Image (tube, rainbow, N blue to C red):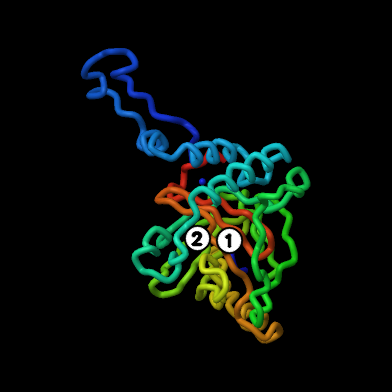
Amino acid sequence: MKSITAFALGLAAVDSTSAFNLPGLDTFFKPPASLVKASFLPQDELELIEAISYTSNGKNADLNTQARVLSIVRRMETSAPPSPLLLSDPEEAKILDGDWYLQYTQPSEIEAVADSDDKWVAIGASEGDSRIDTRQFNARGSVNAAGITVDASEKGVAKQSFDISKNQIRNEVETVVGRVTVGGSIRPSATVPLRAIAAFDFGRIETKLGITVDISGLFAIRALLKGSKESGWLETTYVSENLRIGRGNKGSLFVLTRDRDAVKP
């Protein structure tokens, strides 16, 4: 389970005082913090949040919704790409560090827009000697790691955490069985600066029966058979204080937010 590997409410806060010309009304009524935050999000982020809301992490997104999401995402990726030093400069990395919540997943390419001249294309996807698996994973609302598929739409929101200073990544997701946690190291790709290559070596399942199962050995066995501990990568193609977009080695698109409740499921 390598990456499991990502969010917001498409509403704008209304200034009640100016709308109704009632001085002092804001003393008695203050909009929820989530609405206030939403009102300060860039227009593209608000539009994306609206598009992915009510899709159960992408599981229920039809082709029209997927095409719309890809269009918005591509616009964001090309108009505001992250700094190429995102994974190597401690100051730049601050925007990436910490917890992110997975709000939406879908394939990076769908038939409706397969012929687009502006589609995103992975460079050197197999990462040379790392022999990263690039077989396409076309499910929606799910994540795949080390050949294991987890439905990210089942229970709550999956969490991904970065500690760039320690080159560490951790993923958590609630399932019908219990909480699944995997962790490991990351390193920047030598050819794609915004790509973090993951080598997971820790995993456990905390079952709802109170039993914890250590699955770290699965990573060791897989690394032995594969000849490399590195098994996947995540390329950050857009990032702000509130929202992050990533592309994975199996062709998946991920949208994550800082606010766990940013997107209506």
Q: Is the residue marked by circle 1 packed among few (<14), some (14-19), or many (20+) residues within 10 Å?
A: many
Q: Is residue 172 above or below residue 232?
A: above
* Residue 5 image label: 1
Amino acid tagged 1: Thr
Residue identified by numbered label 2:
160
Of residue 188 and residue 191, the one placed in the foreground of this image is 191
Q: CA distance from mark 1 to mark 2?
A: 7 Å
Amino acid tagged 2: Gln
For the residues bearing labels 1 and 2, Cβ distance under 8 angstroms: yes
Do we see residue 212 in this rendering?
Answer: no
Asked which quadrant contains residue 23, the reply is top left
Q: Residue at (69%, 66%) from the top-left corner?
A: 148
Label count reads: 2
Where's residue 13, x and y in %? 39, 29
Quarter of the image for the C terminus: give it. Answer: top right
Where's residue 255, x and y in %? 55, 50
